[in-house]
Image (tube, helix red, strand yellow):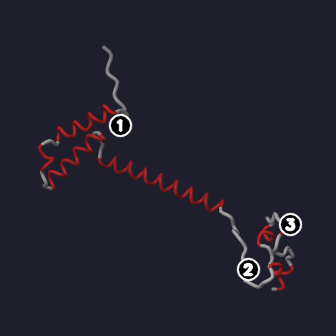
C-alpha cells in the first residue's frame, strides 16, 4: 500500500476543517474560561496547529522578512512615481498679465509641442530682461 499524500497547507476545505477540529479538541474545556492563562494557552495551541512546530523566533523572523520585502516594494514604487511624474504640470500667470511676456516653461526644457500656437513666449531673451 503506497503512503498517503500530505495535504497542502490551507489548500483544501478538508484540511481547514481538520485544523479547526484539532483546535476545538485541544481547547474544548477551556473555551469558556476567562483567565489570562487559559486564553494564552488557547492562543498558543491555535498558533501551534496553524503553523506547526516552528520555532517562535523563526516565525518572527519570517514576518520581519515579509515586512522588509513589503517596504522595499513600497520604496521602489515611490521611486518609480517620482521618476515618471511630470516636472511642470501647468504654467500659471497672474490676471491681467500678458502671456507673451512670460517664457514658456516647456520651451525652456525643450519639450513644448505647441510651437506657434503656444500662448507663452518662446523668446529666451525675455527671461533675462525681467
**Picture coordinates of residue 14, whole percent (x, y):** 31, 31
**Picture coordinates of residue 122, whole percent (x, y):** 85, 73
Q: Which residue is mark 2?
A: 93
Which structural element holds mark 2? loop
In this view of the protein, which residue sits in the foreground, 74 or 14? 14
- Which mark is in front, 3 or 1? 3
Q: In screen coordinates, is 36 left or right of 81?
A: left
Q: Which residue is mark 1?
A: 10
Q: Which image quarter: residue 87? A: bottom right
Quadrant (top left/top right/bottom left/bottom right) for the C terminus: bottom right
Q: CA distance from mark 3 to mark 1?
A: 62 Å
Q: Badge 3, how many Cα within 10 Å: few under 14, some, many 20+?
A: few
Q: CA distance from mark 1 to mark 2?
A: 61 Å
Name the residue located 82 percent from the left edge and 73 percent from the top edge.
119
Q: Residue furthest front?
A: 96
**Picture coordinates of residue 57, whole percent (x, y):** 32, 49
Are discs 1 and 2 less than 8 Å apart at CB? no
Q: Which residue is mark 3?
A: 115
The correct choice, above or below, for 129 with respect to 67 in the image is below
Pointer 3 or 2: first along the chain: 2
Pointer 3 or 1: first along the chain: 1
Are discs 3 and 2 less than 8 Å apart at CB? no
Name the residue located 29 percent from the left edge and 48 percent from the top edge.
56
Name the residue located 34 percent from the left edge and 27 percent from the top edge.
6
Count of numbered badges drawn on the protein: 3
The correct choice, above or below, for 53 with respect to 126 in the image is above
Pointer 1 or 2: first along the chain: 1
Q: CA distance from mark 3 to mark 2?
A: 19 Å
Which structural element holds mark 3? helix
Which structural element holds mark 1? loop
Amino acid at each position: 500500500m503506497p503512503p498517503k499524500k500530505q495535504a497542502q497547507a490551507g489548500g483544501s476545505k478538508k484540511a481547514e476543517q481538520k485544523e479547526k477540529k484539532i483546535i476545538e479538541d485541544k481547547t474544548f474545556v477551556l473555551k469558556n474560561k476567562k483567565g489570562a492563562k487559559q486564553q494564552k494557552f488557547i492562543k498558543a495551541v491555535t498558533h501551534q496547529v496553524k503553523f506547526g512546530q516552528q520555532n517562535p523566533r523563526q516565525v518572527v523572523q519570517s514576518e520581519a522578512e515579509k515586512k522588509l520585502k513589503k517596504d522595499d516594494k513600497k520604496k521602489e514604487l515611490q521611486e518609480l512615481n517620482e521618476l515618471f511624474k511630470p516636472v511642470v504640470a501647468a504654467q500659471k500667470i497672474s490676471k491681467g498679465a500678458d502671456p507673451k511676456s512670460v517664457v514658456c516653461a516647456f520651451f525652456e526644457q525643450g519639450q513644448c509641442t505647441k510651437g506657434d500656437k503656444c500662448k507663452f513666449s518662446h523668446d529666451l531673451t525675455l527671461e533675462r530682461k525681467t
